[in-house]
Image (spheres, helix red, strand yellow):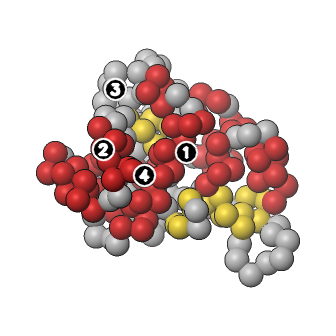
Amino acid sequence: MDNYLLSLRREIPERLHHILTWDFIPWSSVKNRHGDLPNTPLIALLEAYLRLDDLLDMESLSLMEIPPPDSGGCLRCGSCCTYLRPGAVSGRTWRRWERSGMPVAYFYSPFKGKDTPSSYTCWFNNGVRLRMCPFLLLNRMDGKPFCCIHHLGRHHRPRACSRFAPNPPICQTGDFVPVP
């Protein structure tokens, strides 16, 4: 992975270089989802991590011991967060998130072409579609992916994330069908 991070250093603005030292970023997932793209989506993802670092103590979160999963056999492979998008939420839900200062509100965008949006879709940062969930991090205690807002409770996450039912072993075998 070191070669990938070195190549990123040449590709991204200098103001983002310090993020390359964050060992709680799932760099293999980032490479997998952004390796063949222009820099704009990658830079938007790195800027999303900066925003999250302002909102949450990601360093401390990445050092928390995560209890064994109780969600139907989830192995915390990260495939769901890397590939799936939870879909749209109502304007009412988004406004509730925004009023409450919930981090998830920052990464939803109104459907285009509407004066008063009635629904919002994910994952966006500064108008750029993100190729993976910005809340996916690596836990430094066990090296497995985790959701950095999961601990905040169900109402802090999109409903699809809260209701997601893992399907091991399909999730971690590579037979998982990604949604572009």
> Which of the two discs, 3 and 2, labels the residue nearer the N terminus?
2
In the rendered structure, which amino acid carries the disc numbered 3? Arg
Label 3: few (<14), some or many (≥20) within 10 Å? some
Q: Is the residue under label 4 in contact with that under label 1 (CB below 8 Å)?
A: no
Report the side of 99 relative to 16 (left or right).
Answer: right
Is 105 rendered above or below residue 67? below
Res 46 label: 4
> Which of the two discs, 1 and 3, labels the residue nearer the N terminus?
1
Where residue 7 appears, x then y in whole percent?
19, 57
Res 20 label: 2
Residue identified by numbered label 3: 140
Residue at figure coordinates x 82%, y 44% from the top left: 99
Question: Which one is in front in this view, the residue at disc 3 or the one at disc 2?
Answer: 2
Report the side of 134 relative to 77 (left or right).
Answer: right
Is residue 168 at least partly visible in the picture?
no
> Which of the two discs, 4 and 3, labels the residue nearer the N terminus?
4
Where residue 138 appears, x then y in whole percent?
37, 35
Q: Is the residue under label 4 in contact with that under label 2 (CB below 8 Å)?
A: no
In the rendered structure, which amino acid carries the disc numbered 4? Leu
Say which element carries label 4. Answer: helix
Q: CA distance from mark 2 to mark 4?
A: 9 Å
